[in-house]
Amino acid sequence: MSDRKFTPPPSLAVVLIITLTSWIILVPLVNPIAIPIRNNTTGVISQASIENISPYTDYLKYLILLFTPPLLTLIVWKFRKTSPGEYLHPVINITAKTLSQNWFLATATGILLLAWVINIPFNQFQITSLLRDSFHEGEFLGFWPNFSQLEKPFINTVLIHGYGMDVLPTEIAMSFISNNNGIALSRLVVNLQNALTAVGYFWILWEITGLVGLKKSKLPIFLLLCLFWCIFDSIFFKFDGRRGTWFVFQIAITLRYFRLFLPWETPQQLQSNHVGDSHHFPRRQAIILSLLVGLSIPGGFLYVYDRAIYFLAVYLITCIISLFLPSQTSKTWLTATFTGVVISLSAIAIFLGLDQVNAIASQIAYWGKYGRYISFIPLPPFQMTFISQKFWLSILIQAGVLTYLTWDLISHNFQLKPFVRKHLFTLILLSAAGVYMRITLDRSDLGHAYHGAIMTAFLTVYLLLLAYRRYLENPLHQLTLTLPQKLSIGVLLIFILTSESGFNVLEASQKLSQLPAAISVPDTELLKPDYLEAKNVMSPEIANQSCFFNVTSEGLWYYLYNKPSCSKYSYVLYAKPTVAQNQVIQDLERTQPPIILLTNDVWFQNPWDEVLKADSASLIYQYILQKYRPHKFVQSHWFWRRSDIPPTFATTDQFNGAIDVIPESPIRVGQPSVLTGWGVIPENRKPADAVYLSLGDNNQLIAVGEVNIPRWDVASVLGIPEYAQSGWRLRIPTASLPPGEISLKVWAYNSENHQLTQIGEAIDIIKLSQDGART
């Protein structure tokens, strides 16, 4: 056999370096590539033709990214022997040493984290973007008139979240307003709240890093944790934004207190029942930190209700846990936090008055009793797949941790003092993770499921760091890596960092440079045309009102007209309980606003569960149908005017319309049921001004619809061109209908005499209850 010299197998480290480095360089260059179509002879009109981008563009990108790394491999292989690698080694070593310095790591990571904060949390609301979500943005715009015009606003306003979220942003913005730029400035303050929350997250990560007692590389590991925290955002959890601001700082201060003032140094000391009692205890710092926690508890209820309750639960659990800790630690924690609570609560009571404090407490009680029913979305069925992990992974982690703790408690013979001292921070973080799961369980859509997982993510980071310290810290520090391996790790890290769009420093710097111009944009340039038209058209009529009210649950209208809500429940969506609907009716009877907004083409239903407002707020809706009359359309926005008398019912011998489509009987709760047809006022030769739906023999009005659908067939057959827009569509509020046999009637409305004339015959249908029964 002849001797053969085989080339050694390729180095995986070199392959990784070449592939990732080429992609890091190429991707920014490849993305802008666009081959023009030039002469489009296909006749196809598509996105490609509209944007003048040839479909072969993506083929070119693919080929570049596919073949460039192998080409570079050939070049490296060809010059591997003649390359002056021995001269580059010292340069690479010096560079690597510089890159590993704490000052460089801190600076580079700080820049990336600042870019992420600007690109993600600080950019939740793009300041110059068109305002499309009048519901959510209305939450921090619409409550401001109440607090700027009412004497005791907390009594007359049921806040959705709390003063810090619902009022503070716009209140701050109005202190700096110029050029009618309140929306832009309010968005700026909201984004600043989000950025502050991100700082709180990084603080918690710093405290967690300090908890595990790493021997080396504490700062680099903390910086890596911050970077990967940003990268994993929206993958395993989601940044909770300003709603969690107060809570995350409370958790951070709590962790810092117990980290600094528990004098344990070794795992063996953790098993001792008496360790630390005689250790030097920095009492002044301990008092300050625990006092801050106490002061923050009542203040948290001013900022946001639900997260304040979450931390109160964590605090109570922590107080119980502290009873098993060294006496100085527990005594200082209990006395100082209690003192802080008393001081803070007393100051709030003096500043606001006991009546307003009681009003806040009643609102918290209201949300505690009804909140989970108002916006509840059930968890989807669990499927043990990665795609659905957002719903079950947090529960799985918490169950595993609790199982381990139970096992270890048994091994401690149920002796709580050594057990609690050993697992103190696990217990604190587990309690935070547990109470935060309420977000997922009460509102189990994707976004809220991710929000509910964030405290579980902190718990996971802590446990991973414990495992790192125990199993990996010493072996990794003793591990000697070759230069290619070091370079491959560095390149891999750079590749991961560049894949996170939030770390785009250039984009972040551009946003900062554009900020002065952005916050100067007037409201008129940020409003959708139909909202701006409605504001301009209706403002002269609404200007003389003392208040305004809308059934669409859009807080934006209160801001646009600069009017407080006529009811303490300014959002009908959150007044679903009967007691709240009756309160709204009482408020409207007391204030009697001349003009209100009933509906539009978006907010006739709740967007996430598609429940009609005529169902979820049936009492309010039916009250308005009796006490108000159609007034004016501005685009799709339907404004109604108060009437001293309800509409009258009449019959006619003339042909005034027809019902074309009737839903199949029986109907069920939640089943979309629609009536369609056409309606006219024959004596005036015009379409009806509206169509009403009534229930039963006493003609209880339960729904109303617009008459504006094209019906050229009606105009043609009857020979009356004015009937061309006489079509209508009525959505039946199935959830609020009584079960059993019911009778519905459709009525054409004449605004001139405030009269309803029946269209067609009564519709007899059967309504099934939720369990499928007729009665």
Image: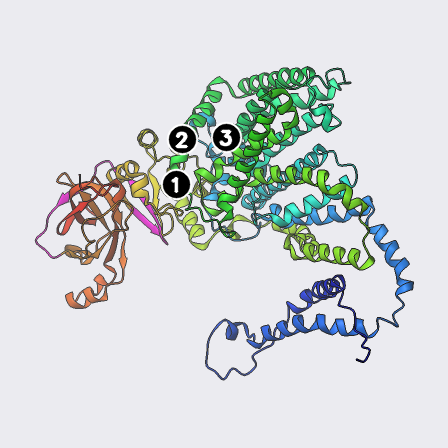
Q: Is residue 491 left or right of residue 292?
A: right
User: Where does residue 732 sit, x and y in percent of width and height?
Assistant: 25, 48
Q: Tell which tag, 1 or 3, sits nearer the viewer.
A: 3
Q: Which residue is mark 2?
A: 568
Q: Which residues are magenta?
A: 631-655
Of labels 1 and 3, earlier in sequence is 3
Task: Using the rendered view, name the quadrant where residue 539 is placed.
Answer: top left
Q: Quadrant of residue 178?
A: top right
The residues tagged by marks 2 and 3 sit, at their Cα atoms, a distance apart of: 17 Å
The x and y percentages for residue 504 are 68, 55
Residue at left 66%, top 29%? 255
Residue 53 relative to residue 217: left or right:
left
Query: Does residue 639 show up magenta in the picture?
Result: yes
Question: Quick check: 365 above or below 25?
Answer: above
Amino acid type assigned to the residue bearing label 3 in the image: Tyr
Q: Is residue 169 visible?
A: no
Badge 2 amino acid: Lys
Q: Viewer-proximal residue, 768 or 505? A: 768
Residue 744 higher or lower than 284, as above or below: below
Q: Which mark is residue 305?
A: 3
Q: Quadrant of the C terminus?
A: top left
Q: Do residues under tags 2 and 3 come within 8 Å of each other at their CB atoms?
A: no
Indicate the position of residue 317 as horizontal and vertical percent values. Answer: 56, 24
Q: Which mark is residue 542?
A: 1
